Image: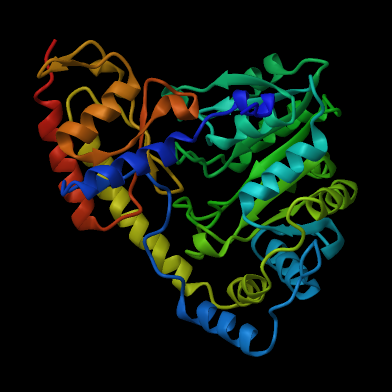
Amino acid sequence: MQLAQRLSSISEPQTIKMAKLSRELKAKGINIVDLSLGEPDFKTPEHICNAAVKAMNDGFTKYTPVAGFGDLLDAISIKLKRDNNLDYPASQIIVSTGAKQSLLNAVMCLVDPGDEVIIPTPFWVTYAAQVQLAGGVVKYVPCGIENDFKLTPEQLEASISPRTKLFMYSSPCNPTGSVYSREELAGLAEVFKRHPQVYIISDEIYEYINYTGRHESIAQFDDIKDRVVIINGMSKGFAMTGWRLGYMAGPRELVQACDKYQGQVTSGTNSITQKASITALLSDLAPTYKMVEAFKQRKDYVIPALKKMPGVKCNNPEGAFYAFPDISSFFGKSYGGVKINNDEDFSMFLLNEAHVATVCGSAFGAPNCIRLSFATSMTNLMEAMERISTALLKLSA
């Protein structure tokens, strides 16, 4: 079959690939501890589920407006003011089928073939693929563990060219858990002020899973706000991954363009999810904070456990639910005829020898690292750390 050429520029996400391999081994009866997927292991809070049932019983089962129900757009506007002190009227907000679609909408409506898009690495796996689908040129800017995987203003300035159209990043970051402070974002904003042709996509999907006490958005800086596109959604902070609802807040002209584009792709988002999301956004956030406290307890176990393992170097994530250790010291070592040449070899070694599923760092633009999710039970995490530690001691030069 002669498939479209654009497909050759993208590949299956490593996160999904490792989950498949993990399921295959489980089907063979092997006990796998899966730390590969980034999904809260908590149930959606009961009051949100009850709101969905009520929506069905009230007859909200028809097609929805492309941009979303008006009362949901108002709820998002209230949330942005309440939590972020940002003013976005409903006309500057659009709802989509997951934050991933919100991202794609923005990229497809901003990027023309040949436009440069700056992506600091490590980055979420889908950013680059979406830019490539739009015909854009990705310009990666490596950010090392020595600076907590965060971009400096000097690096940003050096990466911008006359062809630069867009900058994409996340805070809290998937995969590193790094969180940009207000001061760090202010430094980046000063650079963007000098380059008015550059738009900024700020992926804030992990906003609530933040251990610093406060989330900071780059949209707070008035000089560049009209070029900032905020992406957020319900999946991480409300344990609503399967409900599929993301949203964008940004310049009115871009939101209108995304409405036009989405109208030809998926049209409006699930009606029942939209009604449940209103309840989630405007109700007491106690269930969210309880979930975040559990993630913090797990982080406070996993990070020290990794740091105790000889040869493993790890930052201290301030958000999200991932550890992203540098494991490059094991390259060149071997066990049982298996040699570790790179991060993918290392992940496969852990899968086959320790029976722990992780994701290789090269999927995120950081080939010296691997990603482990601690969005699972403490029992699973304790077992995984013990298995990994035992397996690493088997490796020798």
Does the image show residue 88? yes
Q: Is residue 372 visible?
A: no
Identity of the residue drawn at 61% across and 57% down: 233
Q: Residue at x 68, y 73 (%)?
A: 271
Question: Total number of numbered labels?
Answer: 0
Farthest bottom residue in view: 57
Q: Position of residue 240 (x, y in %)?
A: 51, 64
Quarter that holds the C terminus: top left
The correct choice, above or below, for 228 with respect to 269 in the image is above
Which is nearer the eye, 214 or 119? Answer: 119
Quarter occupied by residue 155: top right
**Depicted 300 relative to depicted 57: above or below:** above
Q: Is residue 120 left or right of residue 102?
A: left
Viewer-proximal residue among 266 and 177: 266
Please determine whether, in this image, residue 58 is positioned above or below residue 4.
below
For residue 87, side relative to residue 7 (left or right): right
Residue 97 location (% of width, % of height): 65, 57
Residue drawn where x is 14% and y is 39% of the image:
387
Q: Nearer the viewer, residue 29 or 145?
A: 29
Q: List x then y, in percent, for residue 194.
A: 82, 24
